[in-house]
Every structure is written in structure tokens, then in C-alpha cells.
Image (tube, coloured by chain):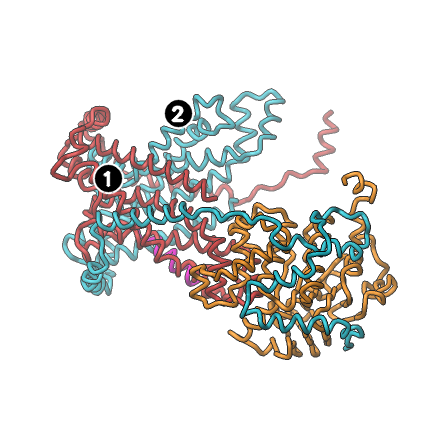
Amino acid sequence: MIELRNVSKTYPNGTKGLDQINLKIEPGEFVAIVGLSGAGKSTLLRSMNRLHDISEGDILIDGKSITQAAGKPLRLIRRNIGMIFQSFNLVKRSSVLRNVLAGRVGYHSTLRTLFGRFPEADVELAFQALERVNIVEKAYARADQLSGGQQQRVAIARVLAQEAKIILADEPVASLDPLTTKQVMDDLKRINVELGITTIVNLHFIDLARSYATRIIGLRAGQVVFDGPVSEATDERFAEIYGRAIDREELLASRLPGPQVLEAQA
Amino acid sequence: MTTNATTWRHKVQKPKKNRYRWLIYVLLLLLYIWAFAGIPFDGIKETAGQITKSILSGLFSPDWNYVYLPDGEDLLRGLLETLTISILGTFVSTLVCLPFAFWAAANRGKSRFVSGSGKMLLSFVRTFPEIVMALLFIKAVGPNAFAGVLALGLHSVGMLGKLFADEIENMDHGPTEALIAAGANRLQILWYAVLPQVLPGFLSYTLYRFEINLRSATILGVIGAGGIGTPLIFALSSRDWDRVGIILLGIIVMITLVDWISGYLRKKLV
Amino acid sequence: MNTNPRANTKTTNTDATNTDATNSKAHTGTNIYTRADASASTSANHNASINTNANTNARLSTNLSGQVGLNRSRPPAPGKLKHYLTAAIILLLLWGSAVDTDASLSKLIQGSPNMLDLLREMFPPKWSYFDNIVPAMLETIRMALIGTTFGAILAVPVALLCASNLSRSAWIYQPVRFLLNLVRTIPDLLLAAIFVAIFGLGPLPGMMALTVFSFGLIAKLTYEALETIDRGPLEAMTSVGATSVQRIAFGVVPQIQAHFISYVLYTFEINVRAAAVLGLVGAGGIGHYYEVTLGFLEYDKTCMIILFTLAVVLLIDYVSTKLREKML
């Protein structure tokens, strides 16, 4: 369970990134965080595993404060929180398998990981993670030989191998085309349903948020302005979040070719 | 037509040239006058043409016997020593420069003072000519190839450290972030996110520096720090032009070959 | 602020997950696999065919099968022989080099007291020696300046001949390049030693050595820069009927001149450093005084020379770098 208590973040230049945020996210939820760019989506997500520090308040992961933790305890908390990035953040020159195994380093002693001697079970786990995202045949390819969508699936496999209980995905599909977007979101959803991993996703496209999430959180200027199930997230409520009517730009559908084109391709 | 010309002249003004431009030209001119006035052009030795001819003919009719002598001190052994001095010197400098490179790299979350001081130190080392370093090391370990190794090893740290630091600075920080998020500690981040990214660049720069070091190693013998330079300077002072020819030929062939191999490897690394 | 009204809907599901996840250390490998298998039986449809239906949730069940299980063969691990071989070759080279150069740490450690003695004798430097070496230092700078200038002038036509986009045919630029590379193999100090043998002691052979060296370096840098210039202006000049000299004057020179000046300054920096040691082989400049002072074991004077050279080199580097930054 993730609990945010009165979380605020003020940047050195005085702007408020997050403003008095209180949230409780239960295990197994699929939460989409929506809002305009600059609303604080990324800051919120990154403060949950403390890639960003907050200025006030507290964040509890399964009852333990991540804002107070440091050193090994902090690393142990982070080990349970997987993160997926907009730019994939793979080591491009390393093999896919090595990138996935990098998710396991938190489980082993430094010395063992430096020699690259992962136990058989870890390698097996990495392969299963790759199978789950349907990319196992690329295991020994270099990461930079893969397409964007494939790279993001490797990043998901890394999180799976990490055996995280929570997945934070920061705009995971923002640099992908509409079709690979769907594959990646399907993967995330499947993992959420099958493994019960709590998933929190920052999304720009509100139709994606509606079709995948169970709960939507709307941010505006660092404040939570909407928090509820998908059924309550009507167009009118979105208009409130965005402070204006929904733009076509905010719909993934606007980027997809029409249905007849796809039928022709199939 | 003339009226046309005058009308546009009112609209567009010719931009004014930098008014100090002429000053720069005058300064340059004075600089050159000073430079040329100071060099004594008091005639060239009459023997110059003859010696040039001898060296050239030495190049084309080299002393092939010198290539291999059974009792040592021959061309092949001299070239081999030159090669080994530069291999080992490059290796030493790569090892030594690694910590300095990480010190000098201006990464996020590091004060400018720290990286600035590291860069200062590296450029200080760089200005020390290797031949002067060799003179100092000869005092320590005697006039032999090892002094050459140490001199090259230390001098190269300046340039390699700077290049390595640049490589670290230009690295993609995404993987580092991903490793932090996965709960890795500092060493694991270094091993899994930093090194895989910078290693090809490091290797390529090391090979590049090796090419430079090989050239430097050919002259270390001039002051007695091993390699092919010693027999060359002896041959020059004893006016044994055929031997000078074969040594020069040997140096040119060796450096060209090594450049080819190193260039091929560097292309493969990228 | 507000807790989610639907928060508890999934608790039964997730409790099981949590216990599983905490146990994961015990049976790391099987965790994902076993649970995946339970749900893998739903469908045999592997291909995530593109669904035209906008409603993704509806399609989720077909995707759930997720190609999990061992129905897809894993690729074989690539051989590691190449890596082992490379490592072996490198180790062999290093070991051989250490044997050949008779290098050992113990020698270094044994010798380090000598080094320390030497350093101790070097300090404090003999400041009064400064007056003796100023003329030699000026001569060093003169040599570097003249050598760089002549080298740069000679480099221009050769660089134009070497550039594959300006030269007429490979029959011209390939041989010229080959000769240029040959010239570049000989280090400056070696050139100086040869020129001293030819022309006798003094700054003249040093200048000539620096000229040849600068020529090689500037010609190489320039022709590489020439090959990256924009072809557009060249074509424009051809289309207005320019001669080849006009083409170069209007299409090439404006594109390359800033680079060229920057390379010349860079070469000048290198030449000042090189000129400072050319005296070791009798080619003029301050390097001569290294031999003199070291020969008489006057290390405090040597130290003064080193410091003076460092100061001058750093100053020239600084000025030249600033100028180059302005240029580009």
C-alpha cells in the first residue's frame, strides 16, 4: 500500500511542484494519473520511489517511510518498486538479458553482481519475464537493435524480474506509436491483473487512462483535483481537470488510423 | 539607374567592420617581424646538401644486415622494445587515469569545484612533456625502458583522463536512474549502468593514445629511456647513413601498420 | 485528501499475491511462471493481432494467454570464446611487454627514494636563473610561430588535393594521402634530430622540424574538415560558371576558414610544447638548458626551467583556447 500524507514539493525557484497531496493506493489497483504537462504528474510518481525528494509530508510504502529511509533500507524499499520510463532507460550497448538481470541487482551482494554470477534461478526468472512480454527470442541481442516498443517491453521485463510489488510507469508510451502503445499498455494491464502488482501510470492520453485504469487521479498545478473510479471520470470531469474542454490532441484515437485502414492491413 | 542606386543606399547601411581589426593585423605583422629577426639565418652548412643526399640514399639502400643480428642490438629488437614500452605505458596510464576521470567529470549532484579541480590537475599533468618526465624517471630507475614506460604512463594520464571525463559527462543518465529505482547501490550502478556505456569510448581513446605513445616511444631513446631512439641517435652521430635509413624505414613501417590495426579496431568498437 | 471508494474491491486477490511476493526469495525462479500458467490456458491466440475495436478491455482476455510457457524456444547463449580469446591476447601482450621492458613494481619502489631525493633537490627552484633562460624561451616561441606558419601555408594545397569531394579522382587523392600519412608517422623530435644532423646545431633545424610536423597535422585536420563541407554552395558556383579557383574562393573558403584558423592555433599550442624539448637534440630553444643543468646536477635550475615552461605553455594555451572558442 502506498500512502502519501500532506506531500508538498517546492522547487528552489519557489514554484510548487506538489501541493498538499494526500493519497492512499491499495494493493492491486491500476491507477492512471492524468493532467496537463507541468501539472506535477512526473514529480508525484518520482517522489514515490524518491528519485525526487519532497519538501514536506511523508510517503509510506507498506507502512515504511521512504522519505526517512537512507542507504540499505532505502534500497530495499526501492527494490520492491519497479519503474518504467518514457525513454526506456536501457543500457543500449548491453544485451537484452543483461538489462533484465540488472533488475535483480538489489537481491544480491555487490561482489556477486560485479562478477555477473547471477544464480540459475535469476536467469530463469529473466527469461520468463521476457517470455511474458513476448520478446524472448531477442534475449542476446543488443538493446539498441530493438525498436522503441520492443525496448519498452524489455524495460517491463526488467521490472518483472525485479519482482516488484508496485510498478511506477512515467509516461511509458509517450515515445511510442499508437499500435505499440497498445501492446505495451496491454502488457502492463495483464501483469496488473495476473500478478496483482499495483500499477501507477502517468498518462497523457485520457482515452488510454479510461480503457486501462481502474482508478483515475487528476492533477492540476500540483493538487489532486479528481480521484475516483473510471466510471466517474466523465468528459465534464476531465474538462475540470484540464481547466478546459478536452482537446483532440489528448485522445490517442486521434493518432490512430481509421478502422477501415486497419482492417485492410489485417 | 543611378537614381535607383542612390535610393537603396539610403535603406541599407553597410555594417561597420570591427574598428580594432587593423590593430590585430598590425600586431600580427609586428609579431612576425620579431620572430624572423630573431632567427639567425647565417648560412647553411655547405655539407647540408650532401648529407641530405646521403640520408635519402640511405633510405633507398638501407643496411639490411642491421634488421636482425644474432647477438642483439638490432632493428627488430629496438622496434619491439619501442612497441612494448608504448603498450605498457598506455596500460599504466589507463589504470591511473580512471579515478581521475571520475573525479574530473562534472556529473549531476557534484559541485563544480570538485570537477574543476580535477580538470586543473589533469591539464597540469598534460603540460609536462613526456621527455622531461623520462629525464626524472631515469634518475629513479636508471636509464632503461622501464623509465620510458613510467614517463609515457604518467604523461598520458593528462590527456586520457580528460577524454574519459568527457565521455562520462556525455553519458545517458537514464540507465543510472533505472538502476537507482531498482534499488542498486553505487558500485552496482557503476557496473551495470555506467561502465557498459562508457567502455567502448574508453577503449577507443586508449587505442588512440596508444598510437600517440608509439610515436613518443621512438624518441625516448634519445635521452636513454629505451626503444629504437638510442641506436638512431648513435647512427646519426656516427654518420652511418645507411643505418639511419633502415631505422627510419623500420619506424615508418611499424607506425603505419599499428595505425592501420588500431584504426580498424577503433572502427569496430563504435 | 480522499480515499478511493473502490479501494477494497481487490483485496482478496492481492493478499495472495503479497504472500507470494514476500516468499519470492525462497523460490525466485518459479514465481512468475507458476502463476502465469494458471491463466495461460484460456486461449491459443498468440499473435497480438491489431484489434480494430477501440475497447481494449474486451480484448484483454485473449492477450492474457500472453505467450507464456515454454511454447517459444529460447535462443542459445552466444559463445564466449571470443571474449576469452581477446582477454588472453591482451594479457599476453601486457605480460610480454613487462618482460621485454624489464618493468617491475619493486624496481619502482626501490627507485622512489631516488625520485624523492631528486624532487627535494629541485625545491626551492633557483629563481635567479630566470634571467638566463628568457632569451631561450623567446627563441622557443619564435620557432613555434614560424614553424606553424610555414607548415600551415604548405598544408593548404595538400589538404585541397587530399579531400575526396574536391579532388578530381582517387588517383590523385589516394597517393597524396598516403604520402601525408607517411610524413605524419615521424615524430617531431626525430625530425629535429635528423635536421640537426643535416644543418648543424641551432634553431633552424628545430624550425624545419616543426614546419614538417605542423604541415602534417594541419593538412590532415583540414582535409577531414573539407570533406564535411556543404556541397550546395559548390554546386551553385559551378552553375554560375565559375573556374575551379573561383569555386574554391567562393564555395569552400568561407565554409572552412574558421576551422582552419582554429586548427592552426591548436597546432601552435602543440608546437610550443614540442619546441620546449627540441633543444635536447640540439635544435635550439629552451630544451638545451635541460641537458646543461641536469648534466651539472643543478636540479634547482632544472626546476626553474620546468616552471617557466609550464607558465608560458599554460598562458599560450589559455589565450589560444579563448581565441578558438571565439572563432567557432
Q: Secondary structure at mark 1?
A: helix
The correct choice, above or below, for C156 with respect to C37 in the image is above
Quadrant assignment, res A229: bottom right
Q: Is residue B133 left or right of residue A113?
A: left
Residue B242 seen anywhere in this rendered image of the structure: yes
Instruction: Check the rendered structure and report the hue given to chain C.
Output: cyan
Residue A220 seen anywhere in this rendered image of the structure: no
Quadrant assignment, res A103: bottom right
Which residue carries the number 2 mark? C175
Q: Secondary structure at mark 2?
A: helix
Q: Is residue C167 left or right of residue B224?
A: right
Residue C120's x, y, as percent? 21, 65
The three-letter code of the residue at mark 2 reads Pro
For the residue pair C198 and B31, the one nearer the viewer reads as C198
Instruction: Check the rendered structure and report the hue given to chain B.
Output: red
The three-letter code of the residue at mark 1 reads Leu
Residue interval drawn in magenta: B116-129
Quadrant assignment, res B158: bottom left
Which residue carries the number 1 mark? B79
Q: How many C-alpha atoms fall within 10 Å of the one at disc 2: few (<14), some, or many (≥20)?
A: few
Instruction: Check the rendered structure and report the hue given to chain A.
Output: orange
Within the magenta stretch, is there residue B201? Answer: no
